[in-house]
Image (cartoon, helix red, strand yellow):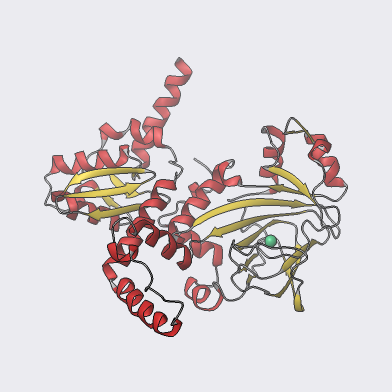
Amino acid sequence: MSKFARRGWRTPAECMAWVLAPVTEDVFRSQHYERQHLHVRREDPHYWSDLLTLADVNDHLSSRELNHPRVKLVNAEGGFPPSEEFTANDRIILPNLLRKFREGYTIVMSSMHDQMHDLGYFCDLMGNHLCHRFQTNLYLTPQDGSQGFKCHYDTHDVFILQIYGRKLWRLYDSPFPLAHKSLPFEQNRVSPGGPAIEILLEQGDMLYIPRGQMHEAISVDDVSLHITGGLLGVTYAEMVTEYFLDRVMHDEDLRRNLPLGYIHDPDQAAMVIKVHMERLFRKEADWRMAVDRFAVNFMRQSRPRLEGQFLQVRCVDDLDLGTRIAIRPNVMVYLSVKEDRVDIEHSGNTITFPITLSGALRAILEKAELTIGEIPDELDDEAKLVLARRLVLEGILEVRDPGLLGEKGFGLLQAVVRD
Ligand SMILES: [Fe+2]
């Protein structure tokens, strides 16, 4: 089990609370999210050490096959050096990469949640809680005033987790508040506005920057390592656009032409269009369908890490009514009750149950942890066990009985050694 999962997360909300602490999520949502930056100062240099350390990155660089452009170099003055200077056939040549690092280039490691198990689990929890995709990039910057990127803005919100060393951040006014990916940063189109807000981000600290806010960061003394957690949000505009494009197939009214001659009398046309649109947009049931559609898409794209699933499956026949089970905190589950059945969307799968199980399924999914015997009594004991086994095999539930897992795990190791 990864060191981050070993922290024993019970719900994804706990992970969000950990990222923000001691600031509460209520304060973050009401005062900072999509509004203004938040610097959480902790004076706890080891705060992130269960998630990532400089040693973890050293191990990764030393032991894994690294490829460009997932791993690349950047420097505020020199930009991106030619990849031939540190790769061969897109494979990173580590001594060359580190030579460039010593020359002042920041090493950028993109989408590391796909490469490092702890970061993957972290992104599962954050994405599950926020219901928007969450990703991680790593930035390893040389000491003494090195700067990776020139002053810029990003088109997604970022959570900067300072893992090692410290960095001086300068934040400026936003030229395009909440800049969207349709407004990507272009160096010669905008320049930083207003006096800089200077923030010295110390090891263990966190800095949230809303999308669109200009920023730059410079290392101070020692090398600096930070995670940038990126919240890849779906905007209202995207939801409306995608949803109504899809509805065109099903809704005749959306296929009607604009009023004949509408350009000749634009005021009248605007009034007719407004009335028509208000009628189309008024139906709450449509918006509920839009949410369902986005939820299912979100589920289908997610591939949560199933910690210890092999050992879970191995002990599944030994479950009894006293076995403690819990929904995996990093697995997102969407339950939709139809007329005759219950569909559960999770991890790219849809599984279907008879409608008679809807109460039991709700009870299981709403509780952080329970014993199989505590599944509602509308099911008999054997049915409770069958349902629990199925949900464990699917990777939705996990067995939280150390004895059961431990004995089986030990048995497994013995078997491997004997073989
Ligand atoms: Fe940035």
Q: Is residue 243 left or right of residue 18?
A: left
Q: Position of residue 385 (x, y in %)?
A: 20, 40
Q: Is residue 165 left or right of residue 330?
A: right
Q: Position of residue 16 (x, y in %)?
A: 50, 62
Q: Position of residue 388 (x, y in %)?
A: 25, 42
Residue drawn at the location 84% of the way across and 59% of the way down: 221
Q: Is residue 240 left or right of residue 24?
A: left
Q: Position of residue 118 (x, y in %)?
A: 55, 46
Task: Note whether residue 271 is visible.
Answer: yes
Residue drawn at the location 61% of the way across and 45% of the way down: 112
Q: Is residue 73 left or right of residue 347?
A: right
* Snapshot quadrant of residue 323: top left
* Snapshot quadrant of residue 407: top left
* Of residues 213 and 324, the one drawn nearer to the viewer in this rendering: 213
Considering every residue shown, the one lying at the far bottom of the view is 267
In terms of image quarters, where does ligand 1 lie? bottom right
